[in-house]
Image (spheres, rainbow, N blue to C red):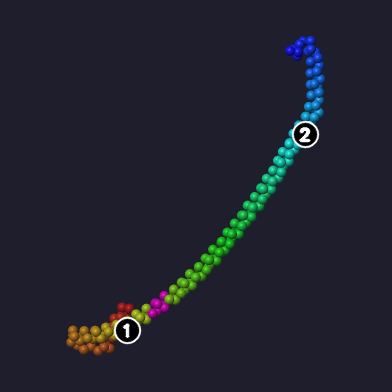
Amino acid sequence: MPQLDVATYLSQLFWLAIFFGLLYLVISRVAVPRIGGALEQRHQRIAENLEMAERLNRQARELLQAREETLAKTREEAQALVRAEREKVAAELEARRKELEAEMAAKLAKAEKALAEARQKALKELEGSVGALAAEIAGKVAGVKVAEQDVKKALERVSGGAG
């Protein structure tokens, strides 16, 4: 093998140094700047993307905060409307309840008056019947004829003293 021949080592080393130097120059002047430029562009694009992502994130947080504020305001307004409606309904119910109570009280007073009148009428009819019955019983038991006027007076004394 010729590359292992000791006599050619010096020329091989010379050409190795020349090609290595040329290769170094080509790589350092052409390839490294291109790779460095690509890396710099990539780094710059990543930095821009991160900056844009941060800006969008801030905007999203601001929008979310505005949404939350609007939502809270809307909830407060809805609760105020519900409270107002509840109060309105409660006032209407209270007014209706008072109206019904007044109506029931009027009906009750009317019924009590009618009941008192009926009671008085029944008592007067009963007094007449009791008076006649008492006169008849006294006539049959005692054999005495009692005047109806006397029986009525006696009943009035008894009922007046008891009532």
User: Decide: marks 1, 2 in contact (CB < 8 A)?
Assistant: no
Counting labels gives 2
Per the rendered image, the range of residues in magenta is 108-114
Asked if 107 appears above or below 42 in the picture, the reply is below
The x and y percentages for residue 46 are 72, 38
The x and y percentages for residue 45 are 73, 39
- The residue positioned 74% from the left and 34% from the top of the image is 39
Depth check: 8 or 108 in front?
Answer: 8
Q: Which mark is residue 114?
A: none
Q: Which mark is residue 124?
A: 1
Asked if 92 appears above or below 45 in the picture, the reply is below
Q: Which residue is mark 2?
A: 37
* Residue 154 seen anywhere in this rendered image of the structure: no
The x and y percentages for residue 150 are 26, 87
- Distance, label 1 to label 2, CA atoms, is 127 Å
Query: What's the amino acid at mark 2?
Result: Gly
Quarter of the rendering containing residue 136: bottom left
Quadrant where the N terminus is found in the figure: top right
Q: Is residue 90 magenta?
A: no
Asked if residue 115 lies left or right of residue 64, the reply is left
Asked if 30 appears above or below 60 in the picture, the reply is above
